[in-house]
Image: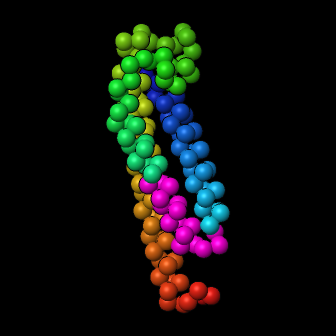
């Protein structure tokens, strides 16, 4: 079970990292206007969090354990029986996906606060400030 949990963490963190990289590139593209930069970052993190939460909540509906990335990463001699593997993998993936969705939601909130603060400063000081 520990090996399955570790592989699920690797799989989800890798996917989450690629989403983060895409969000970062959008944020860098709008860096000339900081409120937009953080607003787009919040939007990207919010969408990522929603997709990961939905995927985590529906992951147990998979029918074939052979289609999961964790199964493919397991060495053939480490693989449990298919009837046992599916609930183990689904539980590990659900936990990791929901954890990363929570992190994304928190990051979304932080970016929204930063965007609002920067916009407020911009309104008070003017566009050149």
Name the image quarter holding the N terminus: top left
Left or right position of 31 against 46: right
Q: Which stretch is magenta?
A: 31-46
Residue visible at 35% across and 33% down? 58
32 is within the stretch colored magenta: yes
Looking at this view, is 49 or 73 the one in front? 49
* Residue 7 visible in the picture: yes
Residue 93 drawn at (x, y percent)? 43, 32
Check residue 69 for magenta coloring: no
Task: Look at the image and tell me in which quarter the C terminus lies.
Answer: bottom right
User: Can you give x and y, in whole percent of width and height, for residue 41 in the image?
Assistant: 53, 60
Task: Give the quarter of the image for residue 77.
Answer: top right
Left or right placement of residue 87 versus residue 123 in this view? left
Magenta residues, dominant SS class: helix
Residue at 62% across / 88% down in the picture? 128
Residue at point 65% right, 63% down? Answer: 29
Furthest toward the bottom, the residue is: 125
4 above or below 21? above
State how many labels appear: 0
Q: Is residue 15 above or below residue 77?
A: below
Q: Position of residue 54 (x, y in %)?
A: 37, 41
**Residue visible at 43% across and 39% down in the picture:** 97
Picture quadrant of residue 109: bottom left
Q: Is residue 99 visible?
A: no
Question: Where does residue 101 sit, x and y in percent of width and height?
Answer: 42, 46
Q: Colour mode?
A: rainbow
Q: Is residue 62 above or below residue 33?
A: above
């Amino acid at each position: 079970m520990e090996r399955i949990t570790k592989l699920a963490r690797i799989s989800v963190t890798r996917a989450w990292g690629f989403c983060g990289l895409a969000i970062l590139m959008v944020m860098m593209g709008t860096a000339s206007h900081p409120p937009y930069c953080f607003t787009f970052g919040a939007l990207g993190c919010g969408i990522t969090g929603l997709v990961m939460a939905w995927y985590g909540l529906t992951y147990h509906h998979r029918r074939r354990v052979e289609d999961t990335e964790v199964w493919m990463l397991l060495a053939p001699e480490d693989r449990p029986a298919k009837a046992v593997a599916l609930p183990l993998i689904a539980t590990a993936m659900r936990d990791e996906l929901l954890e990363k969705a929570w992190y994304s939601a928190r990051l979304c909130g932080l970016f929204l606060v930063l965007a609002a603060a920067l916009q407020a400063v911009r309104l008070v000081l003017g566009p050149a400030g």
